[in-house]
Image (cartoon, coloured by chain):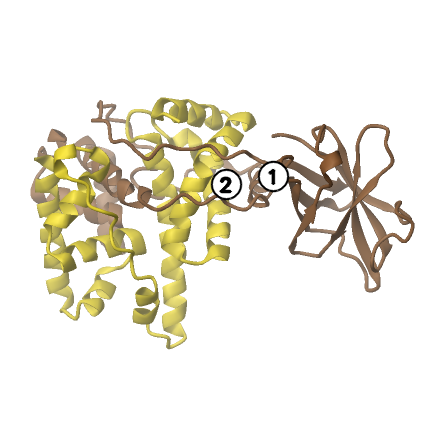
Amino acid sequence: MAAQDLERLLTRVSLADRKAFAELYSATSAKLFGICLRILSDRAQAEDALQDVYVKIWNRADAYQPGRVQPMTWLITIARNHSIDLLRKRRTAATDNADGDETVIDRLESHAPGPAESLQQKDERARIAACLEELAEDKADAVRRAYLQGATYAELATHFAVPLNTMRTWLRRSLLSLRACLTR
Amino acid sequence: MSEMTDIPDDDSVLAAEYVLGLLSEPEEDAFAGRLFLEPDLRRACDLWAEHFATLADAAEAVRPPASLWPAIRARAYGPHVPFWKRLNLGTAVIGTALAAGLAFAALRFGWLEPVPLPLTAELSSETAGQVARIALDPESGAIEAELVGLFPDAGRARELWLIQGGNPPVSLGLLDAGTVVRLDLPADLRASLEGAVLAISDEPAGGSPTGQPTGAVLATGAVTAL
């Protein structure tokens, strides 16, 4: 399904069109469920998260602005942010139970990135993945942990065993390098 | 991508930190305040969101269980959501700031393969409201059914029936309070499901001894494609 089709569906969903909502769910639910699963690493929680995500999409489709971000980016962002919210709550609860958050993060160890696609392919989809490859491994890992696991600066500092301020400087530098690479 | 260089380094980094959710609460509030006034900053956030979203897009697609769709429908189409709740803005991307409306280099996402949706039925009673949510896959005959109200007393059971046209009810099996049970729809009943009626009856433990409903019919609902 092309971006324009998704855009049209979202517009109809914003008008409370149930048929469009069913089509949107049919087209995107497997992708968004995969993302919830990837972030939460727990099937039952991912199922609950996906329910919340689509209820949000139904209620907020009128906030989608065509032309601003791609429809799939909008949908993915809702799924990612909601899953990260749940994950952070889970981590807080785990910490309160004296179960160090480090173990939780380690259990959620991110998969290695897929086979790096060559920059020459100029595949926009792989651009950020390729640009992350240009960073030192631990620097790229920190960015992935922030996006895909919702790691905070404090959690990253603990994981990489560096002071908080160092962590922050590190990551901000990585983001600048990423921007330079993405802009090339 | 040229827009990304149009703003100072610090702002671009702040935008990325905002999209990643790395800012502290006061920093985030201050940044969100600026977003309303500075279109370039919004654009920077959108661009970061587009790039980061492709990282998530690398996750493998997984078909969700059929029972999720009727549950989502029930929640989405349920009680009306007050508008002030709908204004609860989460992120810049979801925000209502005016669109910059700039054409964007085509970032392609993975091809989306639509999954067939199950037929659904919501069974309700006049007194108890929603009693059960059912998803049916007409191809495989798989049924996922969840009893959400009118739970049986000890020694009683809830039995699910399919009524197609003028035919007598056919038992599909017993439901379980609060959990999703998986049932099978016999092959000869899979055609013309849309518009058929599902019903739940009160039966002795183990189900109806006669093959037809023996107790009160507690809830009914039509099978629909939407």
Q: Residue at x 75, y 35 (%)?
A: B188
Q: Residue at x 34, y 42 (%)?
A: A77
A92 vs B133: above or below: below
Find numbered disc 2 in the image and state the secondary structure of the residue it sits on. Answer: helix
Residue A184 place in picture, x, y as percent: 7, 35
| Neighbour tally class for label 2: few under 14, some 14-19, many 20 plus, Cα within 10 Å | some
Indicate the colour of chain B.
brown
B178 vs A181: above or below: below
Q: Which mark is residue B178?
A: none
Find numbered disc 1 in the image and state the secondary structure of the residue it sits on. Answer: loop
Identify the amino acid type marked 1.
Gly
Q: How many marks are shown on the rendered structure?
A: 2
The residue that label 2 is drawn on is: A55
One can see residue A115 in this view = yes
Residue B42 place in picture, x, y as percent: 22, 35
Indicate the colour of chain A.
yellow
Do labels 2 and 1 touch, CB within 8 Å?
Answer: no
Question: How far is disc 2 from disc 1 in space, using C-alphas?
Answer: 10 Å
The residue that label 1 is drawn on is: B78
Q: Residue at x 25, y 56 (%)?
A: A145
Query: In the orientation shown, which residue stands out farthest toward the bottom?
Result: A98
> Where is the N terminus of chain A found, in terms of image quarters?
top left
Residue placed most toward the observer, A123 or B154: A123
A14 vs A114: above or below: above
